[in-house]
Amino acid sequence: MVGTPAAGQRARCWTVERRVGLLGRVPPFARLPPAAIRGVAALFRPRGVPRGGFVFHEGEPASAGNVAAEGRIKIVRETGAGRQVILRLINPGEPFGLSGGWGAATYPASARALDDAVVLQLPAREFTRLLAIHPELALAVIEDLGARLREAEARILDLETEGAEARLARALLRLAGRAPAGAAPASIALTRQDFADLTGTTLSTASRTLAACHRRGIVAAPRERVTILDRAALAAIAAGP
């Protein structure tokens, strides 16, 4: 999808100073000394992506590493049967699509904007050069890849051993993150289809499960948003039988 003028305007607001501020909080770049972060920030190029637009497609040359600056990105793959599966949801401040820095020829999955988004992109050749001259960056990337592998293994185990209700409850808790005492109820903006794709179930099953939780007062679930009302009850469902 071609970027819109509004998307381009948002991207132009991401000056080098704003990029420095973001990258200083983003693993793995936060490991770099301040002077190096400023140099890296100058290499990133902001790109506006409208809601529903693709940052990259599965099988395309892995030309850049990415950091989400605004909006959420979903990482998706299609099964042999043509069904879409969401592998990860990327929030602002999270890196994704770093495979080009490790010499991968193509992206192993597609990245699509869930919201109007801005993505900071670092050419793969520059990322490879940075890994060679900053061993602390390379180590941080390895640690991040290890965490992603453990997350993927946990999701595979869920798909093989847990029912749809438990999978959906775990996904909601994971997306909501930890809530401090007295915090407002966590609200998650996702369509029913996105929930189905994220939990490896069908649209009808995801809709039916959310409706049941809504009737029980565990969540409030209008069409494209879910608000967690009873975190303890949701955690009990996530724990399984």
Image: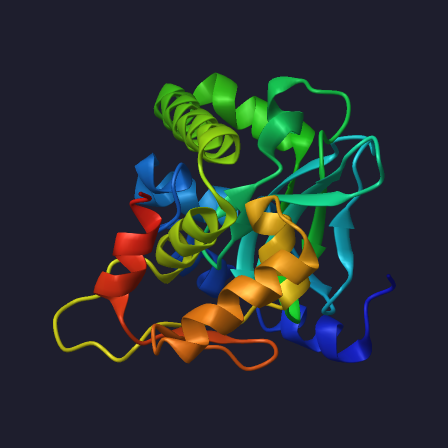
Query: What is the x, y in percent for residue 26?
Result: 39, 47
The image quadrant of residue 229 is bottom left
Horizontally, is 209 left or right of 53 in the view? left
The number of numbered discs placed on residues in the rendered structure image is 0
Report the residue at 29% width, 45% height from top.
239
Residue 167 seen by the camera: yes
Above or below, comparing residue 71 to residue 160 in the picture: below
The residue located at (46%, 20%) in the rendering is 133
Q: Nearer the viewer, residue 131 or 56?
A: 56
Q: Residue at x 60, y 19 (%)?
A: 102
Residue 158 drawn at (x, y percent) = 45, 35
Q: Is residue 50 left or right of residue 206?
A: right
Q: Between 172 and 89, which is closer to the camera in this rendering?
A: 172
| Residue placed most toward the observer, 230 or 104 | 230
Q: Quadrant of the C terminus?
A: top left
Farthest-out residue, front: 241
Q: Is residue 114 visible?
A: no
Residue 144, position as x, y percentages in the image: 41, 30
The N terminus: image quadrant:
bottom right
User: Residue at left 87%, top 64%?
Assistant: 2
Tell me residue 135's x, y (percent). 38, 19
Q: Quadrant of residue 46?
A: bottom right
Q: Is residue 221 above or below residue 80?
A: below
Task: Name the foreground residue: 91 vs 181.
Answer: 181
